[in-house]
Image: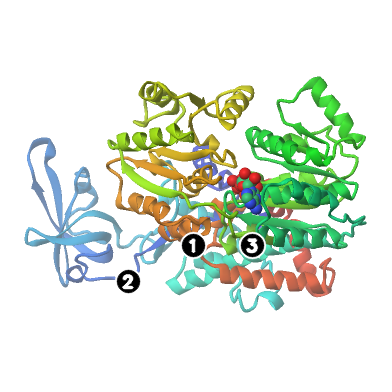
Amino acid sequence: MFLRELRTQPGELKGIGPRTAEAFASLGIESLGDLLLHAPRYYEDRKTEVPLSKGVGGSPVNTIATVIAHDWFGFGRRRTLKVWIEDSSGRAALNCFGRNFLQQKLPVGAQIRIYGQFSYRFGEIQASSFEFEASETPSGTSSFGSLVPIYPAGASLRQGAIRKAIHEGLAKYIDQIEDELPPIYAREEIPVSKKKQLQGLHCPETLDEVRLARRALAWEEFFYLQLSIARRGLALRSTRKERTTARGTLARRVLESLPFELTRDQKTVLREIREDLRGSRPMARLIQGDVGSGKTLTAFLAACESIEAGEQAAFMAPTELLARQHAENAARLLEPAGVRLALLTGSVQSRAREEILSRLESGEIDLLIGTHALFSEGVRFRCLGLAIIDEQQRFGVLQRVALSQKGEEPDTLVMTATPIPRTLAMTVFGDLDVSVIRSMPPGRKPVITHLARMGREEKVYEWLKKEVRTGRQAYCVYPLIAESSKMDLKDAEGMYEALKQRFPDFRLGLIHSRLDEEEKVSVMRSFSSGEIDILVSTSVVEVGVDVPNATCMVVEHAERFGLAALHQLRGRVGRGEFQSYMFLVYAPDLSEEGKRRLRVMMENSDGFAVAEEDLKIRGPGNMTGTEQAGFLRLRFADPAADGETMLRARNLARKILQDDPGLLKPENSLLRQVINRTRPFEEELINGG
Ligand SMILES: Nc1ncnc2c1ncn2[C@@H]1O[C@H](COP(=O)(O)OP(=O)(O)OP(=O)(O)O)[C@@H](O)[C@H]1O
């Protein structure tokens, strides 16, 4: 049996009641397979015996000693038991704070094993934090004498309970668990059997065993992941596509109407897209480019190509606000060139929706812009040729697939402004070709970023006033929508009122996610057209909002926002010809690390640099694939930390599929079996998000 097929629930094990089973479930452990893959956080060495006199200071140690006396200190209710112990090297005191009942459990004369943190205080060796057991405890139930794994446990599970369940599970099933990867592929990367891996993980003799087990388990995850991705990529690229190519006439007409030229990178990306569109296979391409680098425009021009070739294009944005903004821009740019477009979001209902759907089906709409409503039921294209997806990370891979299914293998173009470390790109976008827009449109001045401590907002507001007086506009962003009794933070609603008082001559607007769509749209429209001077908001304006006249971005409680979010917010200004400013107002008690993060914003204007610094500060461990990629449940593999391994796994996966796309060769039969049986894993990959 393969480990991932082990569906027995922990509750079926002896001695695990419904409460414990529930606690396991809250850790994501629903089956014995999950349980046996529950990775320890670290191991305590309760094996190497250290004499009492040598174990002082530093980390906890393991020792064997005899109880020689009981003693008491303190008075009344605070009277505390002190147990004296001794070995051949010396004696020490165990301070039993709150545990006076140990008097019975540690009788004079008893021989015990102790695991504790000893220090030298008041002229004696002491430990206040310790665990113990009788030295003759039978080894099966002992938590001493070995490397003891310490597991992620949550609030309601004790380490002992987890250990016990895992040991039971292992005892019951270990002999039935088979290796999953054929040795011809895995010998080098996985030198030990699955049985040995599980033993090495949960009951290792040495730390080397742990390392070997973890490496093997991580490798296997990388390999399956890359095999799934490679298989999908293969499926995508093996279908052929009939092409009636465009000449670029429509795109040229649009370009001629623009007051500017495309940047060099925009031109390159457009050329790459055109080549894809001429190719015999459907395009699957990602455009990565910093905020405001001109991705959307490039995507519109790509749409022109498909439209000119007689097909339809769909453009999916992550929010209704953005879908509307894109639709308005498209109307301005593309309609004069003859493109027929429509907007479809959740709030377009009944008659209007029906009319759009029927025009779409009869081919009277060339470009449909919208939210995830685009792939809802009833949306039928006459001939969907190109699916454009903005800010992919907000959608799952599923949505990408779902939108593609509205056509016959349409070309897909995904856009993201979030800089993704290369190794992560291999997971999230592993099946896509990548184009990068690095240069900014000419004349853009990098946004100047200032930090200000809370209490010094006046200066910031003065600056804001000056900017607005010269005709510019500003954003003021807050972490909360409304006042919260739990958190002492400024909120958008409250600050909207306060700033109205502070700037009686200016026109203020308020926007946040709790407003209904109509209201949001109308506020945004007033801001775009210059009828609002200062827009007070939450991070709803984070992604994609495009108002070139806005030059001032004030973020209060900046320490509450992630660096990626701050960088996105900063992208809302500096989108026109004017010098723009960002002010990050932070709480006075900010930690050193917090200050360092904000300084990164001050010193770097490039999104990739910000992401890299972010990675350095947070450390790769915190930026695992699981967190970033959302839908991948990797327990041992860390794409950010171990890109090299992933690359090797990818190469192997690709090579195997290249030689044998259907995994039909005899040496691949086990692999085929695994991949087919571990379907849930792949489905997880596709369905998550
Ligand atoms: N080559 C160019 N020269 C001058 N301005 C440009 C150029 N390309 C795009 N722009 C303008 O720059 C602004 C940003 O462009 P666009 O919205 O396409 O960027 P984006 O990368 O999609 O931004 P975001 O990631 O913030 O959504 C728009 O106002 C657009 O008209």
Q: Position of residue 531 (x, y in %)?
A: 55, 26
Q: Amino acid at mark 3?
A: Met
Can you tell me whether the CB of the residue at mark 2 lies under 8 Å from the nearest atom of ligand 1? no
Q: Which residue is mark 1?
A: 202
Disc 2 versus disc 1: distance between alpha carbons?
Answer: 18 Å
Comes first in the chain, label 2 or label 1: 2
Where is 396 relative to 48, above or below? Answer: above
Residue 352 placement: quadrant: top right
Count of marks placed on residues:
3
From the viewer's side, name the closer residue of 76 and 309.
309
Give the label, 1 or 3, closer to the camera: 3
Kindly indicate whether the residue at mark 2 contacts the one at mark 3 (C-beta within 8 angstroms).
Answer: no
- 574 lies left or right of 544: left
Name the spot of residue 346 as percent of width and height, x first: 71, 28
| Mark 2 burial class by Cα count in 10 Å: few <14, some 14-19, many 20+ | few
What is the spatial separation of the Cα atoms under label 1 and label 3, in whole angstroms? 31 Å
Q: Earlier in the sequence, mark 1 or mark 3?
A: 1
Q: Residue at x 76, y 68 (%)?
A: 670
Q: CA distance from mark 3 to mark 2?
A: 42 Å
- Residue occupied by mark 2: 48
Say if residue 27 shows up in the picture. Answer: no
Between 658 and 57, the one nearer to me in the picture: 658
